[in-house]
């Protein structure tokens, strides 16, 4: 494989300020969630050196596998959770009174603001096929203390061409805007391609972008991608060419204006400093009203916060210079 768009190694990349087409493969790592019968997810961001893509600050892929989720109530602050299923179904319940079953094609978006808690259960008692994408979007400082709220969207805008269809989850792509609440300039889209189908998607040059391929394989900006890694594409691209392999592909595009804020991320919290995270942890452990009333159906069961690390939590910083090598 060769890729003429890979940035030469000597090109310095300040991800926040320096534009220029970059293509860097962020390898995924396996992270076990939710105890012994939990789901092992594949995580790409936050990555050492790349904590965010736009305001996107977290990307997990789980499945496809037979899974029975019993993820009990747990808190969030400072972020939006984005749930998007490729296969299966999940029941979301939260402390602002929402109960919503999500199926493929629907978007669940929970804006935690200053605090919310939620649970995620697969329906029924038996393991069932599940393939999911779970992402977080960091809320910009000016809006991160807002009231928590939850939304589910079943009607999302679609952009299509010969051999491909793109669903806009959040933000805007090629003039098609999602109704989902967004608090920073952002895009999230799922692109489905027929075998060998090619899509050329217009991008905003001021956005940085990332692409992952949950199903099948695809060549993205000249880089061959299979399941797992995230291709980070930097800013300053006017278009993105995606070509599916022989089995077709489902591709996730994320992007946005570089956030330009240092985030302190720990457990399920996104904040700006150690003290704030420690306070959120203490509030959860104290059953503080900040996270809303208990979700009745769980009868008090919840996920306790892990102990804070001994060291002071620091912002995740971008590497001042990312290597140009992009082979996954
Ligand atoms: Mn959660």
Image (cartoon, rainbow, N blue to C red):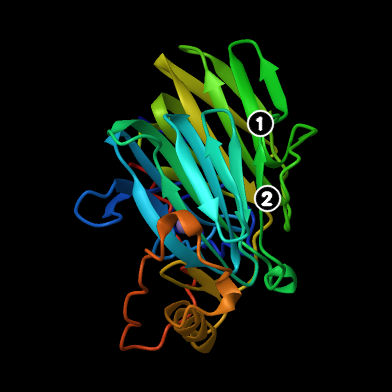
Q: Residue at x 69, y 49 (%)?
A: 186
Q: Residue at x 46, y 66 (%)?
A: 268
Q: Position of residue 281 (x, y in %)?
A: 45, 80
Residue tagged 2: 207
Residue 65, compared with residue 180, is above or below; it is above
Q: Are marks 1 and 2 in contact (CB under 8 Å)?
A: no
**Depth-wise, is mark 1 or mark 2 nearer the camera?**
1
Instruction: Locate residue 323: give its quadrant.
Output: bottom left
Q: How many marks?
A: 2
SS category of the residue bearing label 2? loop
The reply to whether the residue tagged 2 has its Cβ within 8 angstroms of ligand 1 is: no
Residue tagged 1: 154
Q: Left or right: where does residue 122 sit relative to residue 208?
A: left
Mark 1 or mark 2: whose residue is earlier in sequence: 1
Instruction: Locate residue 245: give its quadrant.
Output: top left
Residue 60, compared with residue 80, is above or below; it is above
Instruction: Locate residue 107: give its quadrant.
Output: top right
Closer-to-camera residue (9/194) = 194
């Amino acid at each position: 494989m060769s890729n003429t768009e890979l940035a030469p190694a000597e090109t310095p990349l300040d991800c926040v300020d320096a534009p220029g087409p970059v293509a860097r493969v962020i390898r995924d790592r396996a992270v076990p969630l939710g105890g012994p019968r939990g789901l092992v997810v594949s995580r790409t961001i936050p990555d050492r050196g790349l904590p965010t893509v736009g305001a996107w600050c977290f990307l997990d892929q789980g499945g496809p596998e037979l899974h029975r989720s019993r993820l009990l109530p747990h808190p969030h602050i400072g972020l939006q959770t984005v749930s998007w299923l490729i296969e299966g179904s999940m029941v979301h319940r939260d402390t602002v009174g929402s109960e919503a079953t999500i199926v493929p094609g629907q978007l669940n978006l929970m804006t935690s603001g200053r605090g919310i808690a939620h649970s995620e259960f697969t329906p029924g008692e038996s393991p069932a096929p599940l393939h999911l994408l779970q992402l977080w979007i960091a809320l910009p400082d000016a809006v991160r203390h807002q009231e928590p709220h939850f939304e589910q969207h079943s009607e999302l805008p679609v952009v299509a061409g010969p051999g491909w269809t793109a669903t806009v989850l959040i933000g805007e792509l090629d003039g098609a805007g999602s109704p989902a609440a967004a608090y920073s300039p952002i895009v999230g889209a799922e692109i489905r391609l027929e075998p060998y189908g090619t899509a050329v998607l217009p991008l905003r040059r001021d956005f940085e972008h990332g692409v992952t391929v949950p199903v099948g394989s695809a060549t993205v900006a000249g880089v061959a991608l299979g399941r797992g890694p995230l291709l980070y594409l930097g800013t300053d691209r006017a278009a993105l060419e995606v070509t599916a392999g022989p089995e077709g592909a489902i591709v996730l595009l994320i992007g946005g204006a570089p956030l330009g804020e240092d985030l302190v991320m720990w457990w399920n919290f996104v904040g700006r400093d150690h003290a704030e995270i420690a306070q959120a942890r203490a509030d959860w452990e104290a059953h503080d009203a900040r996270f809303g009333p208990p979700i009745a159906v769980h009868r008090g069961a919840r996920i306790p916060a892990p102990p804070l690390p001994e060291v002071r939590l620091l912002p995740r910083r971008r590497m001042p210079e990312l290597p140009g090598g992009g082979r996954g």
